[in-house]
Image: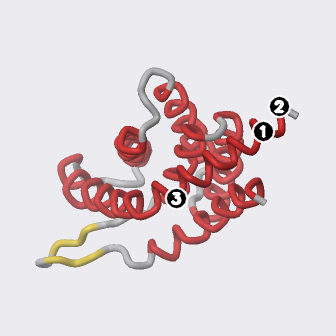
C-alpha cells in the first residue's frame, strides 16, 4: 500500500502544481509577484533524502519529461533539472544529518537553485528579458515564501510516509 502511496503523491503533486499556478501573479501596490509552485520537486527531494536516490531520480526524469511535454516547449530542461536536484540532495545528505529542519533548509536551497537555473537558461536563450534584481524581488522571494509554506505544512507528512516505506522495504529484505 505504501509503495503505491509514494507514486500516488507524486502524481497528485504533478497535477496540483498548475492548479496552484493559477493564483499567480499576485498584485500588491501595483507590483506583480509571481508565485511558482514547486511541490513535485520538493517531494522528490524528500524521496531522495528519506527513501531512495535511484527512485527519486527515476521519478524526477519521468515527471520532468512530462512537465517538459505538457507545460513548456523545450524538451529536456526539467527532465535534466529534476534528477540533478535529487542527485545533489542525496549526495548532500550523506554529509549532514537527516533531521527534518535540515532537510527543509536543503530543500528550500535546492528549489532556489531550480529557479535560478531556469532563470539563467531562459535569459540566456532570450525567452525572459528581466534583470536579476527584478527576478529576485518579484519571482524568487515570493516563490520561496510560497514553497516554504507548503513545505512547513507537508514536510513532516512526507518524511513520515517515506520513512515508513523505507522501513517496510528493509523488513522485506530481512525476510
Q: Quadrant of residue 130?
A: bottom left
Q: Earlier in the sequence, mark 1 or mark 3?
A: 3
Estimate the x, y position of residue 71 in percent, counting from the top left.
Answer: 58, 64
- Quadrant of the rendering where the C terminus is positioned: top right
Estimate the x, y position of residue 95 in percent, counting from the top left.
Answer: 45, 21
Any part of residue 75 in sight: no
16 in relation to 85, above or below: below
- Quadrant of the rendering where the N terminus is positioned: bottom right
Q: Which residue position is annotated with label 1?
A: 171
- The residue closer to the viewer here, 41 or 98, is 98
Q: Which residue position is annotated with label 3?
A: 157
Residue 174 has which mark? 2
Estimate the x, y position of residue 174 in percent, counting from the top left.
Answer: 82, 31
Q: Earlier in the sequence, mark 2 or mark 3?
A: 3
Which tag is nearer the camera, tag 1 or tag 3?
1
Measured Cα–Cα span from mark 2 to mark 3: 26 Å
Q: Residue at x 52, y 59 (%)?
A: 157
Q: In the structure shown, which secondary structural element does the residue marked by tag 2 occupy?
A: helix
Q: Quadrant of residue 82?
A: top right
Estimate the x, y position of residue 24 in percent, counting from the top left.
Answer: 36, 74
Q: Residue at x 19, y 56 (%)?
A: 137
Whether label 2 touches label 3, CB < 8 Å = no
- The residue closer to the viewer here, 71 or 175, is 175
Whether label 1 touches label 2, CB < 8 Å = yes
Q: Residues within 10 Å of mark 1 (few under 14, many from 20)?
A: few
Q: In the structure shown, which secondary structural element does the residue marked by tag 3 occupy?
A: helix
- The residue closer to the viewer here, 62 or 162, is 162
35 in relation to 175, above or below: below
Measured Cα–Cα span from mark 1 to mark 2: 5 Å
Any part of residue 30 in sight: yes
Amino acid at each position: 500500500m505504501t509503495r503505491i502511496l509514494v507514486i500516488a503523491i507524486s502524481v497528485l503533486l504533478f497535477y496540483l502544481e498548475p492548479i496552484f499556478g493559477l493564483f499567480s501573479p499576485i498584485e500588491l501596490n501595483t507590483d506583480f509577484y509571481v508565485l511558482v509552485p514547486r511541490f513535485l520537486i520538493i517531494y522528490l527531494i524528500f524521496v531522495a533524502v528519506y527513501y531512495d536516490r535511484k527512485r527519486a531520480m527515476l521519478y524526477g526524469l519521468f515527471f520532468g519529461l512530462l512537465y517538459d511535454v505538457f507545460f513548456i516547449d523545450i524538451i529536456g530542461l526539467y527532465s535534466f533539472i529534476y534528477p540533478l536536484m535529487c542527485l545533489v540532495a542525496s549526495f548532500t545528505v550523506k554529509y549532514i544529518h537527516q533531521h527534518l529542519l535540515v532537510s527543509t533548509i536543503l530543500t528550500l536551497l535546492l528549489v532556489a537553485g531550480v529557479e535560478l537555473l531556469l532563470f539563467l537558461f531562459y535569459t540566456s536563450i532570450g525567452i525572459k528579458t528581466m534583470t536579476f534584481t527584478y527576478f529576485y524581488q518579484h519571482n524568487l522571494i515570493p516563490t520561496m515564501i510560497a514553497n516554504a509554506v507548503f513545505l512547513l505544512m507537508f514536510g513532516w507528512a512526507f518524511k513520515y510516509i517515506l520513512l515508513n516505506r523505507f522501513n517496510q522495504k528493509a523488513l522485506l529484505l530481512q525476510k
